[in-house]
Image (cartoon, rainbow, N blue to C red):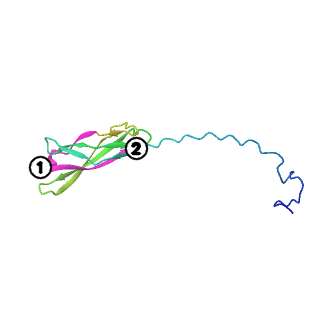
Amino acid sequence: MPDPSGHTGGERGGAGGRTTSPGPSPAPTPGRSTAPAPGDLSWGRPVTEATDQRWCQKVTVAFHNVGGVAVRSGSVSFGTHIIGALGIDWGTVTSTVGLPAPIAPGAREHPAWTVCVDAWRVPLGMHIETRDVSVRWS
């Protein structure tokens, strides 16, 4: 009875079969180490405190670098709203400061800034609220 290769008997070998055992398998190539993930910064909502001037606030923002390398530079922009006596939002002033860098991988930072707008923008009876934060980093 023929085997699946079509041979009817006898010794296998030659061009269609193996007569020797295969050699040792090649050594595995060294794996590349995975590059660390880039800096990935997350931040919280601004926490504000009043100051003795109605046109300024102390603003604290929590940062957390969840990436694999340090965040080395960047900027933080604040959107400060000017609020009237009846609670009406009269406008927003944007200010930008430098990011307190470097922020190491896994590190948490809680820097604070004094954010001010021009005094003439906040007449008596009005106040400011820094509500918006945006961050750019590299």
Q: Pointer 1: residues within 10 angstroms few (<14), some, or many (20+)?
A: few
Residue 66 or residue 112, whichever sits in front: 66
Give the residue drawn at x 20%, y 50%.
129
Image quarter of the N terminus: bottom right
Q: Pointer 2: residues within 10 angstroms few (<14), some, or many (20+)?
A: some
Identity of the residue furthest to the front in this view: 1
Is residue 40 rendered to the left or right of residue 15?
A: left
Is residue 46 rendered to the left or right of residue 88?
A: right
Type of amino acid at the residue the image marks with label 1: Pro
Give the residue drawn at x 21%, y 45%.
48
User: In the rendered structure, which disc, 1 or 2, sits on the residue that comes first in sequence?
Assistant: 2
Is residue 57 rendered to the left or right of residue 24?
A: left
User: Which x, y percent locates residue 57?
Assistant: 19, 43
Residue denoted by label 2: 66
Residue contact between numbered discs 1 and 2, judged by CB atoms under 8 Å: no
Image disc number at residue 123? 1
For mark 2, give the secondary structure: loop
User: Which x, y percent locates residue 46?
Assistant: 26, 47
For mark 1, give the secondary structure: loop
Give the residue drawn at x 36%, y 41%.
74
In magenta, the rendered stretch is 111-138
Badge nearest the viewer, 1 or 2: 2
Q: CA distance from mark 1 to mark 2?
A: 42 Å
Type of amino acid at the residue the image marks with label 2: Val
Residue 8 or residue 138, whichever sits in front: 8
User: Which x, y percent locates residue 88?
Assistant: 16, 57
Residue 117 belongs to magenta span: yes
